[in-house]
Each structure stands twice: as C-alpha cells, then as structure tokens.
Amino acid sequence: MTPLHLPHYTQVSCVGDGLAPFRQALRTGIGGLAPCHFDGTALPTWIGEVAGLDDAPLPAPFADYDCRNNRLALRGLQADGFDAAVRDSIARHGLRRVGVILGTSTSGILETEIAFRHRDASGALPASFNYHGAHSTYSLAAFVRAWFGLEGPAAVVSTACSSSAKVFAAAARMIHAGLIDAAVVGGVDSLCLTTLHGFASLELTAPEPCRPYDAARQGISVGEAAAFALLERPPATPDAGAVLLLGCGESSDAYHMSSPHPEGLGARMAMEAALADARLTPAAIDYINLHGTATLNNDAAEGCAVGALFDGRVPCSSTKGLTGHTLGAAGALEAVVCALALTDGLLPGSANTRQLDPALHLDYLLASRDAPVKRAMNNSFGFGGSNCSLVFGRGA
C-alpha cells in the first residue's frame, strides 16, 4: 500500500488522558490497574477503569448518544488537541471527504444493563432507554460523526479485540479508493458487568494485575480506553519524524469460537500479510507490540507464531499490564504505543511480567529501554480468530 500519514493521535485510559501520562507509564512501567469495584460490584480481579466518566452527561445537543462509551469517546476527542486537528482537516478537505471508521466491542452494553434493572412489572424496558443512540455498536460512529458535523462515510468495525486495528485497514482502503481524503480512526470500549462476569465465567480473569507472557500468567485484566488517530495522505515532503501507516494484514483462523489456533496460524498469516503490504521482510521490524492478553492459550499461540516468523530476533512486549485489555479499543490504543515507540525511540517493557515463559522463543522486553525504532508492528487478535497486524514507520 502507499503509506498514509498519522499527523495526530491520542488516548485516554486508566493511566490518564493524553499522550503525556501514557509516555510516562510506558517508560516507568507503572500503570493504572486497580482491584475491581465497578458499578457497585466487587470481583476478585483487577481492572483498568477511567475515572470520572459518570460525573457529567454529554452536552445537551448530543443527549441521544449519552452513555459511558460515548462519554469516554468525547474524553478521547478532547485530549491533546485532537478535536482541533480533526476540524482543521475538515476545513481542508470538506465535510463529505473525511470519514469516521471506529472499532468497539462492548459499545454501550452498560446502558442496557442499567435499563434491565428498571424494567416495569411486565418486564418492559424503560421508555427512556435509547438502544440506537446508547447501546448499538454504530452509536459510537454516529456520535463522533455528529460531533464534527461530518457528512462522509461512517462505519463501526466490531470484531472483538481486533476491532480498532481493522479500522486502519478499512480507512486505508477508502482513502486509496478515492472515497475520502482523511479519516478519524480509532476505538472506544468501556467497562460493563457483562464483560467482567463473562470473562470470569470463562476463567480468564487474573486475581492480580495481568502478567503477559509470564511463566506464571493467570489471565487478563479487563480495561477501558478511547484511542484516536487522524489518517491522511502524507504531504509531498513529509517530516522526518512523521508516523506513517505502512501496511495492514488481516486473516481469520476459522478454528474455534473463542480459542486461537494452537500454533498461531491465523496470527502468522496476518503478520505476513502486513509485511507484504508494506513490502518489508521480518528483519526490517524493530519492535512488535504483541496482543499479549496474559491468558495461557493466547500468549502461547501468538508467541509460537512470532517466534517462528521472526526467529526470536525482534524486541517485543505486551503493554496490557499498564492498561488492562481494552478489548475493542486495544488495536488503536496499541497503535499509539507503536507511534510513541517510533517518535520517542523507545522499546516499551512489559509491566508486571517477571519471567518469560521459557517455552517461547522471543526477545521479550521485561523493562523499557531507549533504542532507535524505524518500523514497528502492532498485533490485535480477537475471539473467533479475527486477526489484524499493522506496520508503522517513521518518515525518511
């Protein structure tokens, strides 16, 4: 593919709002996970909760979209001047030439949980419950599109944990097809009890902060986040430090509803496709942000695929020990990790991981260190074997 420019990007997660606290967390290995006391429910696990989301509803003109997920989205849009950057892009390209392609998994499920608690004697949901604006997956894109007053294409990808990685591929196709000139891409996923109890019922949640790729890993820490990027064609003479999207690779395991292929077949296919799209060999990658959820099967399968393709020669880590697994937002959040690795010359370490699983053939980073990074890969692999790998690079 022809490289595309990421002139602006940002995040909001349990480590804080914007790039500054995220940079600090990546360098220090100190994240925002805490014992779970969400929505009045205590569970024997740790989560990555964003503070203050219940303090104020959305502004009145957007009341139909009010829910935790869209409040989190607004926090993301307002971080690091991202809102202004998008409006500048709209001024240059026009309302119909800027797309909105976002990923989410849980969307506004919490609003439906709350509505169920207030059913009447017949079991009917409250009349005030607005499924379209608050729960449906499209609500996220509809809200962001309305916030900017856009008139171009808008779509939501909901493929579990690969959702907001796949939006980069979808937006790139739209730009290269000439349908749009720029896109707001990213992902937002907020906490809800359905997710927390669901992962607990699968015995996938850890009783401590998650330890990706650790020999004694016990499972995931669920988190929530909003992460956004502006995707455009690069200028004629891009800045030497510009972050570029170089390639995208997608695949499907077609193996099991919730378990990955044991040898990471689909993961390897996605990584190989991303490298081919970027016209690169495995040796050209300087850092890999692994999906690394800290479950036994996921880390083993991905580790097998990465070890085989890269022969244990590329530094890699999972950053979910800082933020938790943010599900449908993970791809975009960890794309921001790759962007910061490129711009800051940083190889992020894996928070909470103490000893690499000896069965895995990886150059795994237990602590962060400074090093030149010219090209980075981001892996996002979802339930059902939906896989996406992205390759980012620095302008020459």
Image: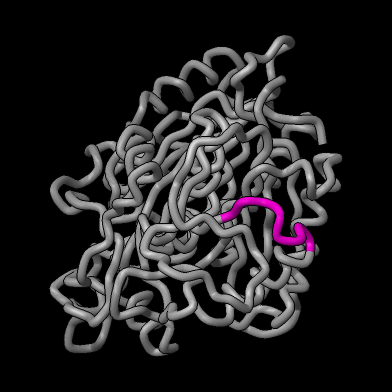
Residue 28 horizontal/vertical position (percent) = 33, 45
**Left or right: where does residue 229 sit relative to residue 124?**
right
Q: Position of residue 279 (x, y in %)?
A: 86, 40
Front position in the image: 113 or 206: 206
Q: In this view, does 88 lie above or below 334?
A: above
Residue name at image x 47 percent, y 73 percent: 214
Front one among 201 and 16:
16
Q: In which quarter of the image is residue 196?
A: bottom left
Q: Is 12 left, or right, of 304 in this rendering?
A: left
Does residue 144 lie above or below 238 as drawn?
below
Percent position of residue 236, x then y: 74, 11
Q: Which residue is drawn at 57% across and 52% down?
A: 289
Q: Is residue 82 visible?
A: yes
Indicate how the structure is coloured in the image: one colour
Q: Which residue is drawn at 79% across and 33% down?
A: 176
Q: Quadrant of the N terminus?
A: top right
Q: In this view, does 172 lie to the left or right of 241?
A: right
Image quarter of the C terminus: top right
